[in-house]
Image (cartoon, coloured by chain):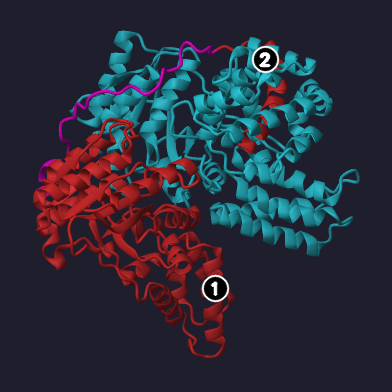
Chain colours: A red, B cyan
Amino acid sequence: MTIVLIVVIVLLLALLGAGTATVVRRNQSGLGGRPSGPTITPAEPQPDRPGGTDVVAESGEALAPPDGRPRLADRLGRAKSLFGTSLAAIRGRARIDDATFEELEEALLLADVGLPLTNRLLADLRDRVRSGEAGDSPTALLDLLKSDVVALFAGEDRELQVASDPPSVWLFVGVNGVGKTTTIGKLAAREGASGRSVVVAAGDTFRAAAGDQLAMWAERSGADIVRGADGADPSSVVFDAVQHAAARGADLVLADTAGRLHTKVNLMDELRKVRRVAARPPGTVTEVLLVLDATTGQNGLVQAREFAEAVEVTGVVLTKLDGTAKGGIVCAIRSELGLPIKLVGLGEGAGDLVPFDPEEFADALFA
Amino acid sequence: MFDTLTDRFDGIFKRLRGRGHLGDAEVGEVLREIRVALLEADVSLEVVRDLVERIRARCSGAELSKSLTPAQQVIKVVNEELTATLGGEAFRLAYAPRPPTVVLLAGLQGAGKTTAAAALALWFKQQGRHPLLVGADLQRPAAVEQLRVLGRGVGAAVFSEGTDPVAVATKGVEEAVRVGRDVVVVDTAGRLAIDEDLMDEVRRVAAAVKPHYTFFVVDAMTGQDAVRSATAFGEALDLDGVILTKIDGDARGGAALSVKHVVGKPIAFVSTGERPESFEAFHPDRMASRILGMGDVLTLIERAEREYDAGAAEKAVERLRAGRFTLEDFHDQLQQMKRMGPLQSVLGMLPGVPKEVRDAQIDDRDVARVEAIIRSMTPAERDDPSLINGSRRLRIAAGSGRTTSDVNNLLRQFKEMQKLMRSGGAVGAAARAGARKAKKVKGGRVTPSLKDAGSLR
């Protein structure tokens, strides 16, 4: 409470400045036009749009045979054609010199790997060049770096866990706009197709129409959805979903949460509560998945740290990797925090969520 | 938002401050630090190189001045270069001579286009315009519904139908003409720059409605991809500016630095929160000052002007000066302040706020608790807290659901504040600050009273 007084004093000081200014220029906007708070309205879903009709069928098909799944490499052609390959020059070179390392540094930094990890990877590489271990071919050097990146992800358990005693709860957390709801939609389709009965919990009661968005996904995949009123306590929605799942004998509850910046203490507290409530019997929280946008820069590491600290994140879902973003920040997250990267989002269709593959990822990083 | 960058520069310049001379070695060291800081802040690699070179040229070149210390010189140069990189002058929006003025929003998925559309509609309303929102995002499930709900919240009409984006946008503009709306904000689906079909679609939307302004919406947390995406969107669409979203987190906002530089279009607006009110025009000079730890007083004053009741503010200042500031006044001010947004974000804008205070986690619920306590007092008690004896204290605690020690704390601190005000330290300084407000903003000086306030803690 101390802080409030400090702030008020500070603000009053600012007000003195503002006060004098207001005398000169009268407040124009007034308060009449201000909204009187959120309006709560019943849902009136829009007609289903492109992609919606064939998605369910496609998902079953796309997911069943392992060969049919979308691959990162397939998606890269387009990105490459637009931006060229920054490392083509390296392979063409005869020997390793400072320029080679500069180009490697550039590639890593441009992929959002971050300066500390980039420096570490390259220092290690320099040592090995010096000791003769790396040979003298830039191509071999690049391959060595790739295998170092792959090694970052060695030994991670990418399996999505379920409890021996259903229902298991998978909780999805992350900042705004990373694709939590879409990821849940895709997973509901995938898990449903693999024979699990799924309940989705519309725990994002803050963003307008987030529940409607999830409801459309649930409809496509045939999952049950449990919703609350707009602005309702997300914990209560998740609680109801777990109860519902237990009563129906469902295997899995996929719990959506509102996007929140990790700096908002009260919202992070709310998330802690959601996790606590979800873990109450009969529910068991087996996964807390941090959804991370591949375009995220160095702030991703801070996000991961804060969310991990608040709700014991068990893994990362890297979304939107089908664009020009490389998602290199997951390297830093893996090496700093040891979180496994479990899934990758490669598009908007229900089948476009695939297990993370370090080899493909490393290839794409230097493509 | 740019706090970490600010801290880094603080660190560099603290070391520099003690030196009388700036040699090549020092410049090199400073530039290395600046490079690291900028890269960690997600500034595009290309921009970092460019910026560092420009700063180097000016620091070691002929521009050295006798009247400034080396540290001041570097700060001046960095500030000017940051400002130049961020976009020189503030973006100005001119309305179409023949309404409606059409604004098109485009960007990647999840950048915050729909929220920004509603916020922009509110902004136009505050400018005295009559916006119509057009929901042309028919891709994401329930995107139009989201826009409808947000539109209702800000009191702007929303037009959409389930045909196709080009038709919706075209009809939206026709609808605006028909019902006499003078601004149209078109929200489009998120798309990847490399998705040729969708890029073609947004190109056709633009061709159909001929927007007066096309904004690229980008998330402040974006890394090196910001530049790649912005370039691709810039090639497909005739961009006029950028809307930077989610800058209320701790992302260092390097995207802000890079996009303008690479795309050559200014940042027009920034959104500082999830609510439509948290949205403002972008001022590059203020942002550069902020990166350098000088606060953003102008934005704060503007916000205060928008949200504060001038008469009440004047009265409060008067009472403060006279030392007759009561709990009732305090409570009123608290209400006014709450309208300016979360305390944390307001605090971040003030110059010279001690780091401990700025970094302190401020829970807006604490404000509610203080309010509850004050509201549980009688008018007489608010006017003269010395009336409050043991039994009144118990009643207030029970009434507000707090403990008596919470009540005591509040009363003690309020008393201390009053004492401080009366002693003239704060009021005197603040009054002076008010008088030379206009000059002070640029200089970013630490008002002594702010330090006093900090020591209260």
Secondary structure type for disc 1: helix
Is residue B445 visible from the viewing direction of this image?
A: no
x, y (%) of residue A312?
A: 39, 58
x, y (%) of residue B121?
A: 41, 22
Nearer to us in this view, B342 or A151: B342
| Chain under callout 2 | B
B428 w.r.t. A278: above or below? above
Identify which residue is drawn at 67% across, 46% down.
Answer: B356
State the predominant SS element of the stretch in magenta: loop
Determine crowd level at label 1: few under 14, some 14-19, many 20+ residues with C-alpha closer than 10 A. Answer: few
Amino acid type, label 1 = Arg
Please determine if labels 2 and 1 lie on a single subunit.
no
Determine crowd level at label 2: few under 14, some 14-19, many 20+ residues with C-alpha closer than 10 A. Answer: some
A195 w.r.t. A212: above or below? below
Q: Which residue is mark 1?
A: A120
Identify which residue is drawn at 38% across, 58% down.
Answer: A313
Q: Which residue is mark 2?
A: B383
Q: Would you say B356 lies left or right of B234 here? A: right
Nearer to us in this view, A311 or A193: A311
Nearer to us in this view, B401 or A350: B401
Secondary structure type for disc 2: helix
Determine the residue located farthest toward the bottom in the rendered image. A132
Q: Would you say B139 lies left or right of B409 here? A: left
